[in-house]
Amino acid sequence: FRQFDDAPPTVGSLGDMLSPEGDSVVFQGRSLHVSTWARRFGFEFDQLKQPYEKLSGGEKARARLASTMLSAPDILILDEPTNDLDIPTLQALEQALSEFSGTLVLVTHDRFMINRLCSSFLGLLGNGRHGLFADYQQWEREVFAGNAQESSIRRSQESEPATEGHESRAGLSREERKEYNRMAQTIEKAEKRVVELQEQLSEASIQSDSGKLEALCAELAELQRDVERLYQRWQELEARA
């Protein structure tokens, strides 16, 4: 699956791209009408006759994703597949990958996606080390445990008298220490809210209301950015703790 349309397929309409030889497709051994398959990726029936080149960037990404999943590969290797995708395409991507019966190798910064899709995790630990983990949180605990150990060693070294020409690095202020001690709970609360919003997105009442769907998607995107900022802040405080 290619996110960028640097080599667009030589097809006419969206329908030609998904089903060049008829009006049905085969997915996971099941025959589906091409309109049913297209609808799973956010396309309406009348869009099947629309020229591929007239589709928007996000629609082209969804069309390529729909076509790729029909090729029935044994293995999919995806490197940061969520980059620069709109919300509908992200939802279509995750739904398609959750139904994929082959082997999926996923390289991504999207911790929510890997927790929902992946059964094992290969995580980098720094200094050339790596390990297998049950989930993202287990890897994260290992990383922060290692950082805490390094911080302890560093504080021990910095407690020695400073040599001439060097200044000791300042640690956390009282307020920053309070913030640092609450950070794990703050992140856990934010991630729980992310999961709640993702569950709401799958509800039929939300899917059928474009206004509510758009508002919820915007709220989810902003909350996910907040979680990213919280992790960055935690790392900043950890480095100085």
Image (tube, rainbow, N blue to C red):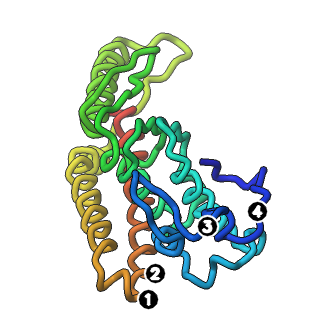
Task: Quote the CA–CA distance across marks 4 and 3.
Answer: 14 Å
**Which residue: 42% across, 51% down?**
97
Distance from disc 4 to disc 1, alpha carbons, whole Å, reads 33 Å
Q: Position of residue 57 (x, y in %)?
A: 69, 66
Asked whether the residues under the numbered discs 1 and 2 touch, taking CB atoms below 8 Å apart as contact, a structural biologist would say yes
For label 3, the SS is loop
Earlier residue among tags 4 and 3: 4
4 lies above or below 203: above
> Under tag 4, what secondary structure?
loop
Name the residue beneath numbered marker 4: 11
**Nearest to viewer (mark 4 / mark 3):** 3
Q: Amino acid at mark 2?
A: Glu
Q: Are marks 2 and 4 in contact (CB under 8 Å)?
A: no
The answer for how far apart the CA atoms under marks 2 and 4 are is 31 Å
Q: Is residue 28 left or right of residue 152?
A: right
Q: Is residue 150 above or below residue 76?
A: above
Q: Name the foreground residue: 53 vs 196.
A: 53
Q: Which residue is mark 1?
A: 211
Image mark for residue 22:
3
Q: Which residue is mark 2?
A: 214
* 85 or 24, nearer to the observer: 24
How many residues crowd around disc 2 within 10 Å: few (fewer than 14), some, or many (20 or more)?
A: some
| Residue ranking furthest to the front | 22
Mark 1: which amino acid?
Gly
Q: Position of residue 206 (x, y in %)?
A: 33, 82
From the viewer's perspective, is the residue at label 1 or at label 3 nearer? 3
Side of 136 where 87 appears, left or right: right
